[in-house]
Amino acid sequence: MEYRARYALIGAFSLVCLLAAFSFVYWIKNTGGLGQRAIYDLRFEQSVSGLSLGAGVLFNGVRVGAVTAISLDPTHPKRVTATIAVDPATPIRADTRVDVTFQGLTGATAVSLVGGAPDAQLPAGENGKPPVLIAGADVGRNLTQSAQETLHRLDVILDQNAKPLNTAINGIAEFADMLGKNSKRIEGLLGGLENLTGTGTPKPGPSIYDLAAASGFPEAEKTIKAQVVVSDPNAIILYDSTKILTRGADGTYASIANAQWPDNLPKLVQARIVQSFENAHQLKQVSRPIDQLNPEYRLELGIRSFYLESGAAPKATVEITARLVSDKGAVEDARVFAATAPAKGTEAAAAAAALNDAFGEVAKAIVGWTIDKL
């Protein structure tokens, strides 16, 4: 009997503890916390989807209490009454606005109380009932309803613009297909634009080949007694460039790829002829045209041929005319100087070397002829 009494006492104590704990939890849940609470009834005339017992009550965004009860009015099917317990210090007024909000984009539903005039009356209850705050007509619109309305509007827009959208999509598809078929051309176009604007990868420039002035002149037995200037050579547009030219058996001309002279050919010929006179010990007597210098003679040059003749036995051909004209305008003498030189091939280096050899013979002959005449 003694053992049964102990078991009964322990069981009764455990049951009392469970009931006390349940009551405490129920009290905390329904009153929103410890301490005194102010009770209000909130009346909604529309759906308040998501609002449940224990939901938070916010006043100007600050949590002040919780929802302790939710009930329906049997005589008004649209009416919902929510009882809230809040901190008595919360400045709720008769004109405080009631709303339903969400704590975060996907958070829980909460009651939102906003504002109220400082001089507004305090809400008062009737017949011992809690004060009643009536929510506005637009309260209770939840995220689902807003999303549904938005989707409905989007569906209407898509329905009204189905044909233009289809046309636009087809156009985009055709454009993408065109881009795919012409990808190489587009890459080339973009590469050209990059080169034009200087933003692309710089490409190596063409190889530069020069002409050498004539040299190896013997000690001067005769010196030109008059002042002579070498005028800018005349040349047809074919030779007035930096291109190294070849001529085919059919008489057509072409330029050697990735190779050029350091300057336009007439300017280069003039510079090397003047240098050839200097190498012949005529430095004081011969120069380029200089302002305020009135020379007694002008050496007028004309480029008639300057190319590599391609074929089984390629050779360089250089032909230059020379005239000695006095300061009175009289032509003292004129002559055509021509020379050829065999080339080891038609590639740039071999062509430039052969043309340099032929030009050297012509330049040396022009210098000797001028010295003899003057």
Image (spheres, rainbow, N blue to C red):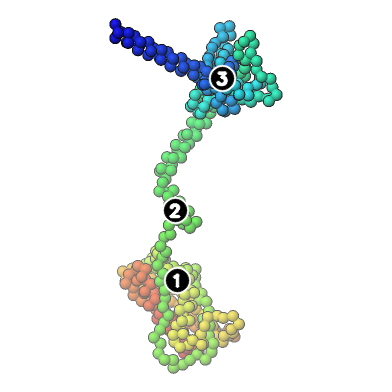
Q: What residue would you read off at disc 1?
A: 262
At label 2, which amino acid type do we have? Gly
Q: Residue furthest front?
A: 2
Q: CA distance from mark 3 to mark 1?
A: 101 Å
Comes first in the chain, label 3 or label 1? 3
Q: Residue at x 42, y 40 (%)?
A: 177
Query: What is the x, y in percent for residue 365?
Result: 42, 84
Q: Is residue 343 left or right of residue 69?
A: left
Report which residue position mark 3 lands on: 36
Mark 2 or 3 closer to N-term?
3
**Structural crowding at the residue carrying mark 1, measured as other residues with C-alpha within 10 Å and reported as few (<14), some (14–19) or many (≥20):** some
Q: Is residue 192 left or right of residue 136?
A: left
Residue 173, position in %: x, y? 44, 36
Q: Mark 1 falls on what kind of element?
A: loop
Q: Is residue 143 above or below residue 234?
A: above
Q: How far from the left and from the top, in percent, is residue 212?
A: 41, 78
In the displayed structure image, the side of residue 271 where residue 121 appears, left or right: right
Amino acid under label 1?
Pro
Residue in the picture at 46% in, 14% down: 23
Element carrying mark 3: loop
Which of the labelled discs sits on residue 191, or is there none?
2
